[in-house]
Amino acid sequence: MKKISRFTYSFVFLLITSLITLCFWTFHWENIGIPLFLGLIFIVFVFFKDPMPTIPLLLNALFMVSKTPTSFAEIPLYLYLTPVAIIGGMIIHIIRFHVKFLKGKMLLGVLLMFAAMLLSSFNAAELSLNYWFYASIGLVYAIIYLFFVNTIDGNHIKYLLQLLFLLGIIVSFEVLIYYIRVEDVIDAIDNRSIDIGWGISTYIGTYLVMFTAMTFYFIRTSKLGHLLIPLAIFQIIMVLFTTSRGGMVTMAAMLPIFIFVAFYKSGKFWKGILIFLLSIGIITILVLYQNELFIALFDRFNRILFDDSGRVDIWLDAWEKFRENPLFGGGIFARTGDKDYNMFHNTFMHTLGTMGLVGLVSLFIQLFMQFKITLGRLKTENIFLAISLLGAHVHGMVDNVYFMPQFMVIMLIIVVVVEVSEPKVLIN
């Protein structure tokens, strides 16, 4: 058992997990892969005192879904198995290892946001089972955070950085494979039709920005890190091919920060410049060879560059909802539209419109604690994790990022891993 335990903390384990994820996504085998990962998660919960090895299994499973169900009839079996494996495993773990819930610096912000979701029901136009389902997700976030922050033991920051680095490669290749498979690439670019199952253009862009930060971390810290520069350029190009304007603008805004932090006093500046120029030369040849694809890409970007896509009207609508119900907001479904759940395309405006001042206070607490925890120690690892979160929040100014389950889970895991790496601090 000790050998198995040591293996699950190795980079080889992370690499195998990621390769399985990409393979199962590519061949649409998630109906096999996700139950397999859920079973392994359950086993780790039951037999491992430190449940950190569940994190790569959990996060990889998020990016294994190759097709999103469009009706209740299409909901796969693994979706029903998920709460059984995870919640059931957590309960057994708590009982078996006598877990004491004493830590949790961000617990106040998480619980207050859950309360804001419940209180928003006072002003909701209609209360339904869907409403309480979405509201209950706030409690799920609290459970995930409270469980892991009190059970994960030791400093696993580098392990997490390796995991997020590999996830960035997976997402990049999923975008590439999507375009290899699509019949008309130019039409797909022009109509922004990219859908890789677990997410569409906006969400893909968010995670590529977040995970590319880890590539720059390893560019700085690895002995041959400068050889990863072509990978970083590849990931940036894949952001372009998401056709997410918010993702492109966010990457453009974050890239100078990535470069500065990666190369400042690293001793790799000139090697980096050389590799960069060689990479640009190769990309130039590629552009000339497949110029119609890049022409279509930049033509679309040029058309939408100064088009707000109705964002201003949406934000004004959120402000009106807030003015009508300033304390608790207009409810989770305050914005009506053609979907079951419509958002206001801005983290702060969405929070104000749906959960009012109570929600905004909870959001500020969460944001403050995220960066207080991640930047509590100004170490290179912590700085890159904070930059990763910053990139997601910048994107959240124009798109739906915060409150999306994938992001919330990843954000909470980052906070937990950094928090437990510090000297133990009890809940005040």
Image: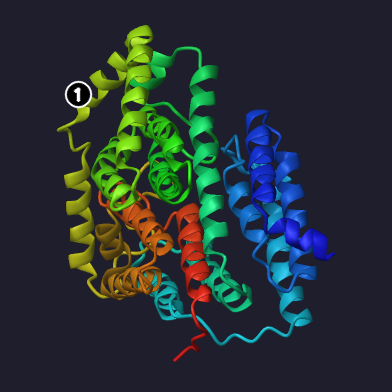
> Is 229 left or right of 398, judged from the image as shown?
right
Residue, far right: 1
Q: Is mark 1 on a helix, strand or loop?
A: helix
Residue at screen point 71% across, 79% down: 94
Between 286 and 397, the residue placed more toward the observer is 286
Residue, far bottom: 428
Residue 382 placement: quadrant:
bottom left
Residue at screen point 30% across, 33% down: 273
Is residue 132 among the parts visible in the rendering?
Answer: no
Placement of the C terminus among the 4 image quadrants: bottom left
Placement of the N terminus among the 4 image quadrants: bottom right
> Is 373 left or right of 314, judged from the image as shown?
right
Measured from the top left, where is residue 15 in percent x and y?
65, 44
Q: Mark 1: give few (<14), some (14-19) or many (20+) Cα within 10 Å.
A: few
Between 311 and 258, the residue placed more toward the observer is 258
Residue 26 placement: quadrant:
top right
Is residue 386 among the parts visible in the rendering?
Answer: yes
Residue corresponding to mark 1: 303
Residue 275 placement: quadrant:
top left
Measured from the top left, where is residue 315 in percent x and y?
20, 52
